[in-house]
């Protein structure tokens, strides 16, 4: 969902388990929206970017409604054609339409009470996806044909695989329709010298998505998914005054949530997949026991339901040991009950009605189950489990003031992320289930279906940190430094199963160490320079069950990633920004901002495939704005990614290509990758009016 009318964004590093919940094992982002104002305020902002046809209109109205009541209304309407071109459909993608309406009321009946009610309704819809196929991989297997040639061969030369990174993609159509609704009631009052706050939250969302997940323009298979989620939470906290040597904040928290998820992996009647499988099995001895064309019009359906209840108590206290030294300590005790069920079944088109009909396991259509088994998809009756877990996460920080402005600290913090149930794993967790399928696969020289996942374990983290906050240049500059070491136990990871799905697994041990620096310097009254630098070292200490990348270990589905780094963990990152303000005549002001953002290279796939690496880059953003007297109006030119870097935000192996090439009788020995790319260079014009 897009940001709208934001007051501030706080990035909190390291575990934040006391005040921000049990799941903040590596950090938290706190987003605070703007409150109603005591005086009338209105603003309208419009943005237009011609290259990708982006239009963004935002309006805010705020002010008093009565002596005790004030309100704020924020509205957003945004659309964009996108930075990819789909050569199959002839349309630009991702085409997006976003609408958000947020209303806030603030009631202050007297000086003792602040009551805030916030309601929000939003939608963000997308047609298409921001990905393309890149980096073809061909393994040297005698007598086999690359995957790119497979598509050309099976389509009579009508289609070839485009693996050039040029923001052109092939797809038969994708969409994602999302709706969100949020409500919040916050009541703040004073109890003597203490303050009491009660926050009631409600959030719900639903979406429907269609993914042409073979990522090629030839019809293969689609994944249609739907999800419906709702959550209610209640927090009550009390805070002491900060005037004495000891101050504290404590409270209680409760949350209840419900999740329903359905999806289907469908093979349309126009699909090329049955033809490809038939060609793959041609001439094999003994002949396969299945007719690949039974897949035409078939689908594998999945349903998932989950309920969760969380109760927690938290406390954080600050004790002044001396005028210059403070001890901050606390903890959070959480208890969670979670139950879930998941079912997988297959359907085929009924010959008479033409409608989908469920195929029972062991029925005469069992060959359909065997065919889906080639892609690690197994039918099974409902799996139902529940889990109950409790955890205490303490934190301890020692702070010392070196002088009136500099502070150093040492901290020990812990974090906890509860275990749960895998929504999207395609295989049953018991590898011996559907032995008939595995026997048939082995008879053809194929690997049995891999073990799926239903339940995964909780994640725990311990973080050790030394740091300081320093004022320099007579208060015109500040520098923050943090040296940290983080130890993860049972780190939760998402692993691609090599076909159509992902499995949530636990890496036994992982360690992260690093150094982060950031600071600001008011070089002159008109020039502010800010920046940051980070060094990061991530290593899986013990992860023997990682997913193999394509061709890493033929015949295996799991490989040992111990000693390896994780995806999206560049060793070095940095940024520097310069903001200059120049006063002109007649009350005009010229403001200029230049941002340089650097990232070292990093692995882009969860399988840690070294053939899919995002290279190091420097991203350049700039903004030049001219504003009138008292900032009543502003016109700005905004440039993003001016060096036109092609930046991968996520990548993975092509599913169908990977499956075909693992068949020794197959006709392909090459895979490739689908990769999501960030937006290339864009230059937009923005105008703002304030009333």
Image (cartoon, rainbow, N blue to C red):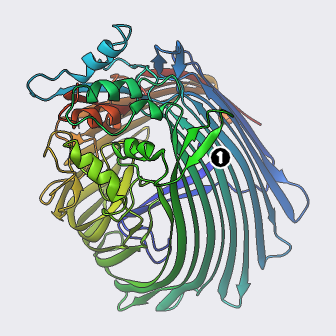
Q: Is residue 646 visible?
A: no
Q: Secondary structure at mark 1?
A: loop
The percent position of residue 125, horizontal first and vertical second, equals 63, 35
Looking at this view, name the residue that lies furthest to the top: 157
**Picture quadrant where residue 213 is located:** top left
Say which residue label 1 marks: 5
Is residue 412 toward the left or the right of residue 420 in the image? left
Residue closer to the observer: 474 or 187: 187
- Residue shown at the point (32%, 18%) measured from the top left: 151
- The image shows residue 687 at horizontal and vertical percentages of 64, 26
Could one spot residue 62 in this view of the protein? yes
Q: Write down the quadrant of residue 37 in the picture.
A: bottom right
Q: Residues within 10 Å of mark 1 (few under 14, many from 20)?
A: some
Q: Establish if 372 lies above or below 448.
A: above
Query: Does 536 sit above or below residue 393?
Result: above
Left or right of 219 on screen, residue 619: left
Looking at the image, residue 639 lies above or below residue 452: above
Q: Is residue 527 left or right of residue 564?
A: right
Residue 99 or residue 504, whichever sits in front: 504
Quadrant location of the C terminus in the rendered image: top right
Q: Quadrant of the N terminus?
A: top right
Q: How many marks?
A: 1
| Quarter occupied by residue 621 | top left
The residue depicted at 42 percent of the width and 90 percent of the height is: 319
> Is 455 placed above or below 343 here?
below
Q: Nearer the viewer, residue 180 or 339?
A: 339
Residue placed furthest toward the right: 66
Residue 233 location (% of width, % of height): 65, 72
Residue 445 pos. (x, y %): 19, 43
């Amino acid at each position: 969902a897009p940001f709208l009318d934001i007051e501030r964004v706080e990035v909190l590093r390291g575990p934040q388990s006391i005040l921000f919940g049990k799941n903040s094992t590596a950090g938290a982002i706190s987003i605070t929206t703007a409150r109603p104002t005591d005086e009338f305020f209105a603003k309208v902002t419009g943005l237009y970017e011609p290259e990708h046809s982006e239009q963004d209109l935002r309006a805010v109205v705020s002010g008093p409604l009565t002596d005790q009541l004030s309100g704020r209304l924020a509205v957003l309407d945004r659309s964009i054609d996108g930075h990819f071109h789909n050569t199959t459909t002839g349309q630009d993608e991702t085409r997006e339409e976003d609408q958000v309406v947020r209303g806030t009321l603030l009631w202050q009946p007297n000086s003792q009470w602040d009551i805030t009610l916030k309601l929000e309704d939003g939608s963000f819809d997308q047609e298409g996806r921001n990905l393309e196929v890149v980096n073809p991989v061909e393994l040297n297997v005698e007598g086999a044909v690359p995957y790119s040639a497979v598509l050309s061969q099976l389509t009579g030369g009508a289609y070839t695989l485009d693996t050039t990174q040029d923001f052109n993609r092939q797809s038969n159509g994708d969409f994602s329709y999302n709706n969100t609704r949020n409500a919040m009631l916050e009541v703040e009052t004073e109890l003597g010298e203490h303050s009491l706050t009660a926050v009631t939250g409600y959030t719900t969302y639903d979406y429907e998505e269609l993914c042409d997940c073979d990522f090629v323009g030839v019809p293969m298979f689609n994944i249609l998914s739907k999800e419906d989620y709702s959550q209610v939470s209640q927090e009550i906290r009390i805070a002491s005054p900060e005037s004495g040597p000891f101050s504290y904040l404590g409270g209680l928290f409760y949350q209840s949530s419900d999740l329903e998820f359905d999806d289907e992996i469908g093979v349309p009647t126009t699909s090329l997949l049955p033809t490809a499988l038939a060609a793959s099995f041609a001439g094999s001895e003994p002949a396969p026991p299945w007719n690949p064309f039974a897949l035409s019009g078939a689908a594998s359906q999945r349903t998932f339901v989950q309920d969760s209840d969380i109760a927690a108590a938290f406390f954080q206290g600050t004790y002044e040991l001396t005028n210059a030294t403070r001890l901050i300590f606390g903890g959070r005790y959480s208890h969670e009950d979670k139950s879930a069920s998941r079912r997988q079944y297959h359907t085929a088109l009924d010959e008479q009605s033409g409608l989908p009909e469920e195929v029972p396991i062991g029925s005469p259509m069992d060959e359909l189950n065997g065919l889906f088994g080639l892609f690690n998809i197994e039918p099974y009756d409902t799996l139902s489990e529940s889990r109950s877990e409790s955890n205490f996460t303490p934190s301890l920080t020692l702070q010392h003031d070196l002088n009136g402005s500099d502070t150093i600290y040492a901290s020990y913090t812990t974090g906890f992320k509860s275990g749960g149930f895998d929504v999207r794993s395609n295989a049953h967790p018991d590898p011996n289930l559907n032995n008939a399928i595995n026997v048939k696969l082995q008879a053809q020289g194929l690997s049995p279906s891999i073990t799926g996942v239903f339940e995964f374990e909780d994640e725990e983290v311990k973080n050790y940190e030394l740091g300081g906050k320093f004022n320099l240049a007579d208060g015109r500059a500040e520098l923050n430094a943090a040296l940290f070491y983080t130890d993860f136990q049972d780190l939760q990871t998402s692993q691609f199963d090599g076909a159509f799905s992902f499995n949530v697994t636990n890496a036994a041990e992982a360690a992260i160490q690093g150094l982060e620096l950031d600071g600001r310097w008011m070089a002159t009254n008109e020039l502010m320079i800010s920046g940051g630098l980070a060094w990061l070292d991530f290593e899986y200490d013990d992860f023997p069950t990682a997913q193999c990348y394509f061709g890493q270990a033929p015949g295996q589905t799991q490989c040992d990633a111990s000693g390896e780094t994780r995806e999206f963990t560049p060793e070095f990152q940095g940024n520097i920004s310069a903001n200059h303000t120049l006063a002109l005549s007649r009350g005009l002001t010229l403001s200029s901002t230049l941002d340089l953002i650097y990232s070292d290279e990093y692995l882009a796939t969860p399988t840690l495939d070294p053939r899919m690496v995002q290279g190091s880059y420097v991203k350049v953003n700039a903004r030049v704005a001219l504003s009138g007297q008292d900032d009543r109006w502003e016109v700005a030119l905004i440039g993003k990614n001016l060096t036109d870097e092609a930046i991968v935000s996520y990548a993975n192996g092509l599913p169908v290509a990977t499956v075909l090439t693992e068949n020794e009788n197959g006709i392909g020995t090459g895979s490739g990758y689908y990769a999501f790319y960030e937006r290339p260079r864009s230059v937009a014009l923005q105008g703002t009016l304030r009333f």
